[in-house]
Amino acid sequence: MTDLLVRRDSLETVKFADGASPEATALAPGEVLLRVDAFSFTANNISYAIFGDFMNYWNFFPAEDGWGRVPVWGFADVAASECEGVELGQRFYGYLPMSSYLVVTPGNITAAGFSDVAEHRKELHAVYNSYQLTATDPSYDDALEAEIMLLRPLFSTSFLIDDFFQDNDWFGAEAVVMSSASSKTAYGTAFMLAKRVGVNVVGLTAAGNVEFVERLGLYDQVLSYEEIGELDADVPMAYIDFSGDAAVRAAIHNQLGDSLVFDSAVGATHIGALGGADGLPGPAPVLFFAPAQAKKRSDEWGTEGLIERIAGSLDEFIALVVEPANRLMKIEHSSGEAAVEQVYLDVLAGRAAPDAGSILSLPA
């Protein structure tokens, strides 16, 4: 077994740890060994690492003291099973570590999949503990596995951001401005917001990404970070922050002042520029936690109702992304320790191209 580990207090520091072979792994009754076949890696996974302690992301896949296993989303196959109802060879989609194998304890087993009810995961959010069986997943398409890995977890957040703002009547905003507009979660959100009548959507991005963001066709206006001064301070606006960049937040607050009606902190793609918001005019940032909105809607619509709504919009979003005349994502497959480490470091440092879609795997 191979695990990529990162220093929790220095995310640039990584190492690989080898464990027991699958054949030597003794499963307890009720346990299953999953072979991690492939997983996606995006800036969203960097956010998991940055907020690992604050939001308990490190607790999903425990590691040795001082080190963490960064959570990812991908597909895994059952390599061994001591659990009735989970069979050898079944394929599941779900939350995984950057590893070659994972031991889980399935519970709540249905035709759709199972939840990992291992002791260390019982207090963690159910959204991340659910594993979906591909054979019964209505939105699964083996020809689009890469796109599903890359877009499903991000778009679920996008869907819930849009739903959260609609649920709160946009906090009185007539326009929404988003940082890191080239990120997949941001433009997934823009895809949903673009369906709303009367809401202007502004995308902020690095100067080098302006052309790509304009090509998305999802934003009413695209500005580089140097052009924040062009935001109309006479229009009530909400800010959705995917970057965590303290300087960008300060510039927006100072430009909009009292016209800024809400500041939603979602991600942290600009790892070298993170900071707080003390002393800024306008509202204090409010952390958006997607599972909280998901629980609200699951209680109201039922879990299946929420899944169906997200799946329907996701199918439309994937169709947009893979449109041959304007394909928005280049799938890049990488395998092996050196390649996985390089992709991790590139995304961490912000060196990945905005249209890159990285699919990774580690040796068995």
Image: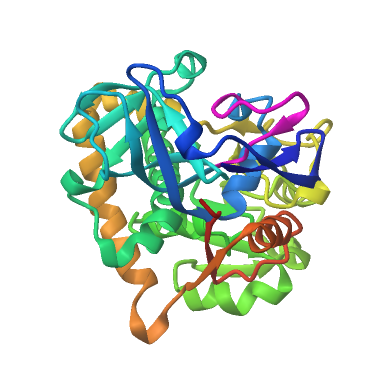
Classify residue 126 as left or right of residue 88: right
Left-right relation of 105 to 205:
left
Q: Residue at x 37, y 54 (%)?
A: 192
Q: Which residues are magenta?
A: 59-71
Side (left or right) of 130 relative to 246: left
User: Is 159 in front, or is 47?
Assistant: 47
Q: Is residue 250 visible from the viewing direction of this image?
A: no
Judged from this view, the residue extending furthest toward the front is 24
| Residue 341 can be seen in this image | yes
Q: Which residue does the image show at 24% across and 31% down from the upper left?
A: 86
Q: Which corner quadrant holds the N terminus?
A: top right
Q: Which quarter of the figure has residue 17?
A: top right
- Tell which of 131 and 240 is nearer to you: 131
> Is residue 350 positioned above or below 243 on the image?
below
| Residue 295 picture location, percent across and down | 36, 24
Q: Position of residue 245 (x, y in %)?
A: 75, 48
